[in-house]
Image (spheres, grey):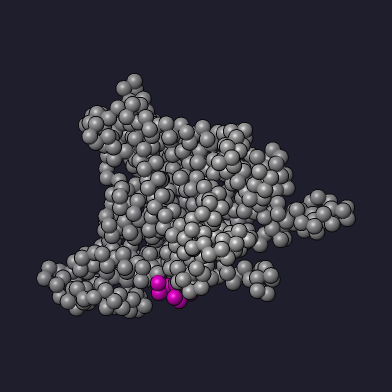
Amino acid sequence: MPVTILGLTFLIFFFISFLSPYQLVSAYVSSPRELQAGNVEKIIEKYGLNKPFIFRYGRWLNAIVHGNFGWSLSLNEPVTKVLQQRFPATIELTIYAIVPIIFIGIWLGVTAAAHHNGAIDQILRVLALLGYSVPAFVLGLLLLFVLYGVLGWLPPGRMDQWAQMIYYAKDFHHYTTISTIDALLNGRIFVFLDLLKHLIDPVLTLSFLSWAGLLRITRSSMLESLGQDYIRTARAKGLSEKVVVNKHAKRNALIPAVTVSGLMFIGLLGGVIITETIFNYPGIGSFAAQAAEQFDYAGVLGVAVIFGIVTVVGNLIVDISYAIIDPRVRVE
Amino acid sequence: MEKFIKIAKKLIRNPTSFAGLIIVLLYVGIAIFAPIIAKPPYPDTPYEMPQMGWSSIPKPPSWQDPFGTTQGQYDIYYGIIWGTRTAFKIGIVVIGLSLIIGLTVGTISAYFGGWVDEILMRITDIFLAFPFLVGVIVVVTVLGPGLSHVMLALIIFYWMGYARLIRGSVLEIKENEYVMAGRALGTPGYRIISRHILPNAIFPIIIQVSMDMATIPLTAAALSFLGLGAPVGYASWGQLVAFSRNWIVSSSGNPLSYWYTITFPSVAIVLYAMGWNLLGDSLRDILDPRMLIGM
C-alpha cells in the first residue's frame, strides 16, 4: 500500500511537471505576499523549480508530508486550510448517501432475486437501467429545477442565511466539524433540520447511480446462492420460502454486496465533484472543480492527493473486512 | 461467424435488447446524417452551434428552432444533433485507444506472467488509485480545456479496466488444452495470442465496450458541464446542460418559462445512455459463457 501511495504522488507530480516553473510557483508558497513581483524568480530559485524532475519531486513530497499543500489561487487561502475546512462536509455528504444506498440497494436486490423473472424483477431491472443511464449532472439539475425552481422547496447551498448566523456565531462550538452532528450537540434543532433540508438533493443525486449497481450485484449473488444444494435441502425440509430466502440464502449472498458497498463509498467520492458543484455544496469536490476551472494547480494537486490516499486506504479496509466476513478468504 | 448471426437473431427477438438496438441505431443515424438533418450554416465549422440572435435570454421553441434556443441564442436542436456526433467521436476515439493499450498491457501481463505481470499490474493499481473523474480533472487542468485534451485525459485514466479484463480472460484461456497443444508444437507466442487466445476473449470485451459507449461520452459531457470540456459554442450535450443551469430559476415569475433549455438536452443524454445500456445488458445475458455452451 505505501508503494501505491508513493506511486500515486509520483504520477500526479509527473503530470504537473509538464507545467512551466512560473505556473508551478503557487504550489510552493504559503501566502500571497510571497508572490509579489520580482519575488517569483527568487521562489523558483529557492525551491529549485528549474532543477531536474526527481529533485523537485522530493521537495514537493517533503512539503506535503509536512502538511503544506501550497497556496490556492482560486480561494486565496492555503490549500491545507481549505482541505481541512471542506473535507468534513464531503465526508458528511458521502456518509448520508451511502447508508440509504446499502439498505435500499440490498433490499431491492433480494426482492428481485426472490421474484426471479417475475413482474417485480423486470420492473426493477428497468429501474436499474434507468439508474445507470441518468448521469449525475442531469439528475441534479432536474432535481434543482423541479424541487427548487418550480416548487421552491429545496434551495442549493449548505444552509440558509439565518442558520449561518447561528452556525458561525461565537457561542456555537464545532466539536466534530461534521455540521449536522455539531448542530445537534449544540442543541440547535432548527439548524439541524435546515442542514438536513440542504442535504436531500445532493444525497439523492449522489446515490442514484449507486443503488442500481448494488441492486444488480445483490440480485445475481442471491440467484447464485438460491441455486445451491443447501437451499434445496432447506426447501425439502419444508421451511417456508421467507425463511429460506432471509435466513439461508441472504447470509451468503451478502458477502459480495458488503465488499461492493465499500468500493461504492470510494466511488461516491468521485461523484462528489459533480454533485457538489451543482448544489454549491462547500466540500472538496466543488473546490476541485473550481480550482480546475481557474488553473489553480496547487488546489487541484491537493485534492488529487487527498482523493488518492482515501481511495488506497479505503481499498485496504475493504480487503480486510472481506477477510473478516468471509472465512474462505482467510484460509487462502 | 455463425455465432454472430445467432447472437444477432437473439438480440432482435428479445424486446429489451431490440429496444436498445433501435435506440442505438437511431443515434448512429443522427450522427451520420447530421449534415442533412441540421444543415450547418458554415460548412467549414459544422461543430460551431449557430447563434440565432444577440439576446442572451433563451427563446421558446418555434418553427425556426424546434427545440428553442438556449443562453446566447444557441440553437438547441442543432446542438443536440451535432452533439450526437461529438458523443460518438469521443466514445470511439477514447474506447478504441484505451482498448489498444488495455489489450497490449493485459495480454503481455497474462501471457508472460512472473515479474512482468507483477510490474504491469502494480502500475495499473496506481492509475486505479484515483477516482476516475479526479484523475481526468488533474490531466485536463495541466493540458488546459479542449476536446482533444479531454479525450487524452479520459484515455490515460480508462485503459486499466480493459487491461484487467483482458488479463483475466487470457489467464483463463491460457490454461486450455488447445493453447498447450499450440505451445508444444512450437507455435510462436504472438501467434498463439493473436490466433488462439484473443478471439476467445472477445465476448467480455464486446459487452464492456457497449456499456462504455454510454459511460465515456457522458463523462466528457460532465466535464463540459464543469467548464473543462469543449470551448464555448462547440456542439456538445454537456454544454447545453451547463447553459440551462443558469435558467433553472426564472425571474419572470413563471417557473416553467425556460423548461426547454434543460428538457431537450437531458432527454437526448438519457435516451442515448439507455440505448447502450439496454444493449450491453442484453448482450451480457446472451453472451454469458454458461449460455454459450449450447450454441
Q: Count of labels shown?
A: 0
Q: Is residue A4 magenta?
A: yes
Q: Quadrant of the C terminus of chain A?
A: bottom right
Residue at the left extreme of this rendering: A38
Nearest the viewer among B195 and B261 is: B195
Which SS does the magenta portion mostly show? helix
The magenta-colored residue range is A1-7
Q: Quadrant of residue A231?
A: bottom right
Nearest the viewer among A109 and A7 is: A7
Residue B179, percent from left and from top: 58, 60
Residue at the front extreme of this rendering: B185
Residue A330, percent from left and from top: 66, 74
Q: Is residue B278 magenta?
A: no
Residue at the right extreme of this rendering: A237
**Left or right, residue B33 beside residue A112:** left
Q: Specify whether residue A236 is in view.
A: yes
Q: Specify whether residue A72 is in view.
A: no
Residue B266, percent from left and from top: 43, 38
Residue under the image location 66 percent in, 68 percent down: A325
Residue under the image location 49 percent in, 63 percent down: B189
Residue under the image location 48 percent in, 58 percent down: B191
Residue A5, percent from left and from top: 43, 72
Nearest the viewer among B278 and A162 is: B278
Residue under the image location 60 percent in, 56 percent down: A102
Nearest the viewer among B112 and B51 is: B112
On screen, residue A206 above or below B272: below
On screen, residue B166 above or below A12: above
